[in-house]
Structures are given as C-alpha cells and as structure tokens.
Image (tube, rainbow, N blue to C red):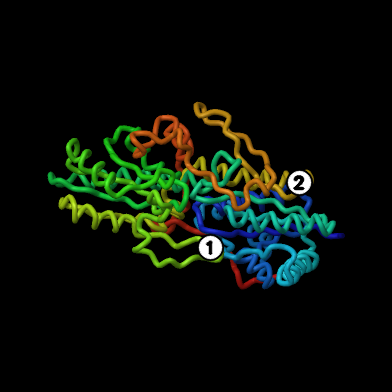
Amino acid sequence: MSQKNLMIAQSGGPTTAINASLAGIVEAGKNSGQFDHIYGALNGVEGLLSRRIINLGEQLADKHALDLLACTPAMALGSCRYRMPVPGSTEAKEIYAQIEQIFEEYHVSCFFYIGGNDSMDTAHKLSLYFSERGKDIRVIGVPKTIDNDLPVTDHTPGFGSAAKFIATSMQEIIRDSEVYNVQSVTIVEIMGRNAGWLTAASCLPRYLGEHAPHLIYLPEVPFSFEKFLEDVTREHEKHKAVIVAVSEGVRTPDGKYAAESNQSGKTDAFGHKYLAGIGKYLEELVTEHIGCKVRSIELNVPQRCSAHLASKTDLDEARLIGQKAVQAALAGETGKMMVFKRLSNQPYQVSISSCDIGMVAFQEKTFPEKWICQNGTFINEEGFEYLLPLIQGEISQEKQNGLPVHFLFQKEKLV
C-alpha cells in the first residue's frame, strides 16, 4: 500500500469530552508524519458504509481549530446506533467486505472508533475480521461514555464532566429547596441504566460542606417503594427539605425497572430500553402517602453535553488518550481499547495503556458495592475520594456575543 491513511469515527451517546479525543487523534496523527491523509466518517459505521467521509486534516488545519474542537460538546462527526452483524451470516459477509473495500479505496491503515460498550463491540468485530483476512489494518477503540461503565479502565472520558454537572446542579437545587420554610421533598432523576456512577456523583456536595442530598438510590441496590417512603419520612424528622437523587434504572427486587409501568417499552438497535419516569413516579408516590410539597426534576440530556461545566481534567485526559491511541497503533497494536489506570488519588495520577478490546465489548462495570453505605442510600468516603479528582479544573472557552463558540465541520465537503 503506497499511501497510509487514518480513519476516525464516533458512535453512541454524546458527551462533553468525545471531541477532545477526536482532536487528540488528529493531532497525534499529523505530528507522527506517518499518514498521508486523516479522514473522518460521518455518523459512525453507518456513514462509513455510505462513504460519507470528510478530510479531517484539511478542516482541522491548525492548533486553533483543534483547540476549539476539543472544547465543543457532543459528536462533531455525528453518531449512530448501528449494530454490526455477527461474522458468518450472509448479511455479515456483505457488510464486512464492503468496509474492507472502502478501507482499501481510501488506503486506510489505522481505524479509530470512539465510543462506549456497543462501539467497542463494533471495533472488536472489525479487528477480528481484518486479522482473519490477513489485512494490516489496525483497529483501536477509544473509550467514551458518561455512564463510566466500561470495564478495565479506571474511568471513561466524558464521565468527569457529567459528574461535575450533576454535582453542581445538585448544589443549586439544594439552594432552591431551602427558600421556603415548609416541609418538602425534591427528587432528582439522573441517568444510569444499569450502573449508578452518575447518580453516585450527587454525593459530592454533601462531602464538600452541604447537608444534602439526603438519600441516593442506585441500580446496584434493589429498590423498595415501602423502604423509600420510610427513608423519606425518617429524613423529614431531621430536615424540612429532603432531597433525593435516584438513578433512572433503579429496579425492584424482581429485576423490573421501578417505573416500568410508566415507560414506553421501546428499545434501541442494541435492545436497550428507553428509560425515564422514575422521578415523576416517586413524586406521585410521595404526594399520595406523605402529602407534603413535592417536585421531581429530570436532569435529562444536559447531563451529557454541558460544556460550560466541563472538567478540565476530563477534557485533558480525553485528548491525551486519543494521542496515546495513535501511538499504540503505530507501535503495531490492534484489537485494543485504550484505558486509564489510577496510580493515586492524592496527588491524582493516572497512566494510559491498552487492553484487549474483547475484555470490554458488551461488558459493564457497575458501581462497587463496597462504596455504598447508609443502608444502601449513600456513598462512602472511598467512593467520594474516587470521584473528586475527576471533576477538577475549569476550561477556557472562546466566546462570541456572550455564547461559547463551537467547532462545526463542513459536512458537505465529502472526499
């Protein structure tokens, strides 16, 4: 192959930090001098299959563009929810052969897929296919997910910024709840299907001097409506304004989502149910059984992409792990995902290495049981010490007319 080019795509749910990893890959690819062109596929594997490809090297021509991209939330290349078929079927043969043909057409020697659990499954399948075909196309997964549920890695890019948004929002909700001298309950619904990492981050204000939240409910602990009402009643004996954080994915002891009767039952391409509604469900429960002033707040999509509250630690690490991914590929690695290893909390230090991507694909890391305390309704000090370093630092955002400036690709300029 006379030319050697690099291809990047993004997939899954958006985060504040995923474009920082994209910037890091482009930056390291350029600086290596080993690639003739650096391409980006729009909307993940779907865009790759339809040849919706742009030249990233041209559109990210200088450091200013890269820095602007690194501070831009969500996926600048666009995303998809596409499940690669299992190799062996007729459909699979056609799709994998098509991707191979496209990579040959664009002289791709390295492919980087930035995403979460399902994206790592795609990268894993592609790396196995190319290896079996004897193709020297190196595939590296770069992690991202606000859910922080990828195994092997200490944490994932995107989580720190989401945790910072949740902790900050919780602190502001605490201020709001204290305005009136009446008995009240405020229920804050936080993302988290099977893992409670994000909801656990709501503990940060209380450890840093606030008196709330008073109760935290994670998917890792079976949820009881009766116990919930008892917990709230008990906290009302000590606090007029009781504040509760609850994961959208809390389940009853029989394994069903606690608010399942209020949900649509619809699923995405990977079979994941669309969740929402536990906050409103519990609001109605408190109204019926306790009868005080009550409201529910669903933090919803701002949890994912609130770059105005980004963690500098998160964005810096996301960019660095993208750079390290290029180094790994150039060193001959393939079928790997880049990972963080925590060396210490104080001072906070991590190292970056890689693991077999098969150890990550379709696997989930839940919040450790050993970090859950207070009869299953709060986070202990060890959990707090894990979370705190990830939200540190403020980013400097370019502003125009009072609003942040975001980097936007010219997506019509296909190559």
Query: Which residue, given by chain and number where applicable, does mark 1 sit on?
Result: 271
Residue named by callout 2:
333
The residue sitting at the top extreme is: 346
Seen as rendered, the residue at the extreme right is: 2
Residue at the (54%, 28%) spot, across then down: 344
Residue 317 position by quadrant: top right
Judged left or right of residue 238, residue 321 is: right
Q: Residues within 10 Å of mark 2 (few under 14, many from 20)?
A: some
Q: Quadrant of residue 378?
A: top left
Which of the two discs, 1 and 2, sits closer to the camera? Answer: 1
Number of on-image labels: 2
Helix, strand or loop at label 1? It is loop
Position of residue 260 relative to residue 344, above or below, is: below
Mark 1 vs mark 2, CA separation in Å: 31 Å
Answer with mark 1 or mark 2, whichever residue precedes in sequence: 1
Which x, y percent locates residue 203?
36, 39
Q: Residue furthest front?
A: 254
In the image, is residue 48 above or below residue 258?
below
At label 2, the amino acid type is Glu
Q: Nearer the viewer, residue 390 or 197?
A: 197
Q: Are marks 1 and 2 in contact (CB under 8 Å)?
A: no
* Residue drawn at 73 percent across, 63 percent down: 87
Residue at 53%, 45% in the rendered image = 315
Q: Quadrant of the N terminus?
A: bottom right
Q: Is residue 374 left or right of residue 152?
A: left
Q: Of residues 384 and 37, which is closer to you in this image?
A: 384
Q: Between residues 211 and 229, which one lies in front from this camera angle?
A: 229
Q: Residue furthest left?
A: 181
